[in-house]
C-alpha cells in the first residue's frame, strides 16, 4: 500500500467550510487505497494575527515564548481537521510536531529539523488511521517547543515523507503549481510542468514563497517527489519537482526559466574588523539564512550583510546590537530580484570560477545579459545593482518599492509565453 503525504496551506483551511472540503479530499484519497498522512498549516492569517498580538503585548517578543504562541495556530487546524474527517466516517488522529517526532535545533522562531522519529505516526498508520500533523513546529533536544520559520509546514511535510519513505508529497495551496514568476505579480507567467530540485531550490532561495527552501533540501537529499497542486483543482495537475535527466533539462527549458523577488531584506554594512562579532550577532537572533559579501576599496575592507526580515521578530533590538558591534550603515527596505535559468551569461563550463569570468563579461558591450538588464533599468528608472551571479542565478538588489516592476520587466522581456 502506498503512503502519501499531503500538506494543506493556510488559505486551504481558512474557514470551517474550506476545512470540511479538505477533509473530503483527504478521505477521497484514502478511499483510493492509500495510507494518508496530512500536514496542516494554521487557518488563514492566524500566524500573522498571533504575531501582531504578541507585538501588542511585547514589541520585541522573547523568541521562546513566541514559539509557544505561534505553534498554537497549527494545533487549532490539526484538531479541527481530525474532527471533520471523523465526521465523514474515517478514523483520524492528530499529533503535534513533538508527538510526531519532529526533532529540531534549539533556534527559536527559525529552527531546523535535525531528525524525524515517527514512532507514533507509524503505529497510527498501521492501525489504519489517517494521521494529521501540525506543521511548522517541532521539539528540540532540550525539550523546548520550536517553530521552523515562516512557510515551515512545507518542510514538516517533506521531512516526514522522507522518514516514512512515502511515495510522494502533495503540496496543496491556492496556486496550481510553480510558475515562471509569482502569478499575483506577473499575470502572464506560465506554469512549469516539471522542475528539477536544483531549479526549485534556486527559486525558493530567491524568495518564491510557493515552496519553502528547506523543504526542497529535504526532498533533494531523500529523492522525494514533490507535487505542487491547487487544493480545489480536481484534475490535480500542477508542477512535479523531481530528479530530471540532463537531456530533459537541455531540451525542454529555455535559458531563463523564472524571475522572482525576495521582499523584506535588511542591508547592513560594517568594517571587516567586526566580522566575527557579526556572525555571533546573527546566531543570537536566530538568523541562519543571511548572505554576507566582502567589499574592498582603497580606503578600507568592509562586509555587507543581507538579512531576511521574515523570521526576525526583534528588528529594533537587532539594529542596536549591530550598531554596538560596529555596523556603520543599516537599511531595512530592500528586496532582491533573481533571474533563474541555466548557462546564463554563456558560462556553460564555469561554476567555481564563475565570478572571474562574469566580471570580465560585465565590462563587455550591451549584448551581455547584465548589460541588457542595466539598459532596461535605466529606461524604467529602476535603481537595481548587481549583487551576485553564477550560471544559474543572476541577482540584483533593489529598493523594495521597485521590485515588482523589475520582476515584470524582466519576465516580459526574457521569458517567452508557454516555454
Ligand atoms: P500556502 O499558504 O498554501 O503555504 P503560500 O502563500 O505560502 O501558500 O504560497 C502560495 C503563493 O506563492 C501563491 O499564492 C503565489 O502568490 C506565491 N508565489 C510566489 N512565487 C510563485 C511562483 N513562482 N509560482 C507560484 N506561486 C508563487
Ligand atoms: N503558519 C505558518 C506561516 O504562516 C507556517 C506555514 O504556513 O507553513 O508561516
Ligand atoms: Mg507556504
Image: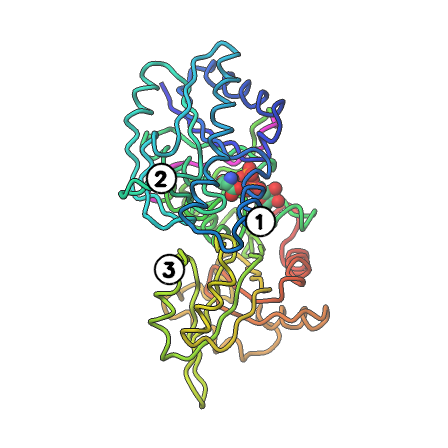
Q: Secondary structure at mark 1?
A: helix
Label 3 environment density (alpha carbons within 10 Å; few <14, some 14–19, many ≥20) = few
Structural distance between the alpha carbons of marks 1 and 3:
23 Å
Which callout, 3 or 2, points at the residue further toward the start of the chain? 2
Q: Is residue 205 magenta?
A: no
Structural distance between the alpha carbons of marks 1 and 2:
43 Å
What's the residue at 31%, 39% (across, down)? 103
Q: Nearer the viewer, mark 1 or mark 2?
A: 1
What's the residue at 52%, 11% (across, down)? 88
Q: Is residue 231 magenta?
A: yes
Compared across the picture, whether 117 is left or right of 155 comes to left
Identify the residue under disc 1: 56
Q: Is residue 81 above or below residue 222?
A: above
Q: Is residue 407 above or below residue 69?
A: below
Which callout, 1 or 2, points at the residue further toward the start of the chain? 1
Image spot of residue 186 (x, y percent)? 67, 50
Q: Nearer the viewer, residue 172 or 145?
A: 145
Which callout, 1 or 3, points at the residue further toward the start of the chain? 1
Q: Nearer the viewer, mark 1 or mark 3?
A: 1
Dot 3 and dot 2 residues touching (CB under 8 Å): no
Residue 179 visible at all:
no
Image spot of residue 108 (x, y percent)? 39, 49
Identify the residue under disc 3: 284
Identify the residue under disc 2: 223
Image spot of residue 409 (x, y percent)? 68, 60
Q: Nearer the viewer, residue 386 or 373?
A: 386
- Kindly indicate the quadrant of the structure image that contains residue 327: bottom left
Amino acid at each position: 500500500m502506498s503512503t502519501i503525504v499531503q500538506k494543506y496551506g493556510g488559505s486551504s483551511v481558512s474557514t470551517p467550510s474550506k476545512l470540511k472540503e479538505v477533509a473530503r479530499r483527504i478521505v477521497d484519497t484514502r478511499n483510493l487505497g492509500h495510507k494518508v498522512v496530512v500536514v496542516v498549516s494554521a487557518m488563514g492569517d492566524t500566524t500573522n494575527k498571533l504575531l501582531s498580538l504578541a507585538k501588542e503585548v511585547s514589541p520585541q517578543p522573547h523568541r521562546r515564548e513566541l514559539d509557544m504562541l505561534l505553534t498554537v495556530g497549527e494545533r487549532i487546524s490539526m484538531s479541527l481537521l481530525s474532527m471533520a474527517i471523523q465526521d465523514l466516517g474515517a478514523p483520524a488522529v492528530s499529533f503535534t510536531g513533538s508527538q510526531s517526532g519532529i526533532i529540531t535545533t534549539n533556534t527559536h522562531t527559525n529552527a531546523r529539523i535535525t531528525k524525524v522519529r515517527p514512532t507514533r505516526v507509524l503505529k497510527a498508520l498501521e492501525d489504519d488511521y489517517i494521521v494529521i500533523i501540525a506543521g511548522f513546529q517541532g521539539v528540540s533536544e532540550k525539550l523546548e517547543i520550536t517553530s521552523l520559520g515562516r512557510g515551515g509546514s512545507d518542510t514538516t511535510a517533506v521531512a516526514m515523507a522522507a522518514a516514512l519513505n512515502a511515495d510522494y508529497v502533495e503540496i496543496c495551496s491556492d496556486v496550481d503549481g510553480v510558475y515562471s514568476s509569482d502569478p499575483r505579480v506577473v499575470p502572464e507567467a506560465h506554469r512549469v510542468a516539471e522542475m528539477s530540485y536544483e531549479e526549485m531550490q534556486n527559486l525558493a532561495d530567491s524568495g518564491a514563497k510557493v515552496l519553502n527552501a528547506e523543504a526542497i533540501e529535504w526532498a533533494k537529499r531523500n529523492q522525494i517527489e514533490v507535487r505542487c497542486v491547487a487544493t480545489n483543482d480536481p484534475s490535480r495537475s500542477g508542477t512535479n519537482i523531481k530528479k530530471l535527466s540532463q537531456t530533459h533539462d537541455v531540451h525542454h527549458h529555455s535559458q531563463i526559466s523564472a524571475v522572482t523577488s525576495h521582499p523584506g531584506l535588511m542591508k547592513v554594512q560594517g568594517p571587516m574588523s567586526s566580522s566575527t562579532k557579526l556572525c555571533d550577532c546573527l546566531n543570537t537572533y536566530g538568523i541562519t539564512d543571511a548572505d554576507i559579501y566582502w567589499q574592498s576599496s582603497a580606503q578600507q575592507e568592509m562586509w555587507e550583510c543581507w538579512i531576511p526580515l521574515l523570521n526576525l521578530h526583534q528588528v529594533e533590538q537587532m539594529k542596536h546590537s549591530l550598531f554596538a558591534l560596529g555596523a556603520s550603515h543599516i537599511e531595512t527596505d530592500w528586496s532582491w530580484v533573481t533571474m533563474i535559468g541555466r548557462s546564463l551569461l554563456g558560462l556553460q563550463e564555469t561554476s567555481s570560477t564563475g565570478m572571474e569570468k562574469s566580471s570580465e563579461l560585465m565590462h563587455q558591450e550591451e549584448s551581455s545579459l547584465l548589460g541588457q538588464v542595466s539598459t532596461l533599468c535605466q529606461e524604467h528608472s529602476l535603481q537595481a545593482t548587481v549583487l551576485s551571479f553564477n550560471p544559474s542565478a543572476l541577482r540584483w538588489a533593489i529598493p523594495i518599492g521597485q521590485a515588482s516592476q523589475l520582476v515584470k520587466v524582466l519576465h516580459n522581456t526574457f521569458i517567452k509565453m508557454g516555454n
